[in-house]
Image (cartoon, rainbow, N blue to C red):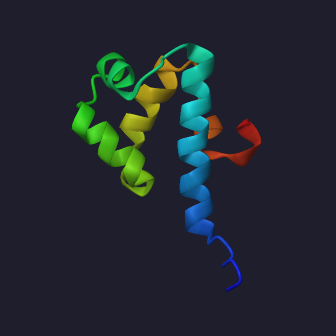
Amino acid sequence: MPRLKESDEQKATRILVDNIRMAQIRAKVRTVPELAKRTRIPQSTLYGRMAEPGTFRYGELSRIARVLKTTVTQLVTEEAR
């Protein structure tokens, strides 16, 4: 069976999660629990948001970007890689 083309929504969520993970590596924030502690976002919430990136709130993305020394725009755009 042929592979289905990735939808725009799927692509956007994949890009967001990939960019967060890459920014974690650059900022030496190794784990999600460490990111949760630094951003003061509960671990369970952060795990849930990473599983369903469309549920992130702007304030949460802003805190993540600040901790990872990047911007929200860089987290959500493909060119950030």
Residue 54 percent across, percent down from the top left: 43, 56
Q: Residue, x 63% and y 18% (percent of image)?
A: 26
In this picture, residue 21 sits left or right of residue 56: right
In this picture, residue 68 sits left or right of residue 11: left
27 over 64 or under it: above or below: above
Asked whether 81 or 56 is in front, the reply is 81
In this picture, residue 47 sits left or right of residue 16: left
Residue 4 percent across, percent down from the top left: 66, 79
41 over 2 or under it: above or below: above
Q: Residue, x 56% and y 66% (percent of image)?
A: 9
Residue 69, image quadrant: top right
Q: Residue furthest top?
A: 28
Which part of the image, by quadrant, shows the C terminus? top right
Q: Residue, x 71% and y 47% (percent of image)?
A: 78
Residue 1 percent across, percent down from the top left: 67, 86
In this picture, residue 10 sits left or right of residue 37: right
Residue 25 percent across, percent down from the top left: 59, 21
18 over 12 or under it: above or below: above
Q: Residue furthest bottom?
A: 1
For the image, the number of numbered tags is: 0
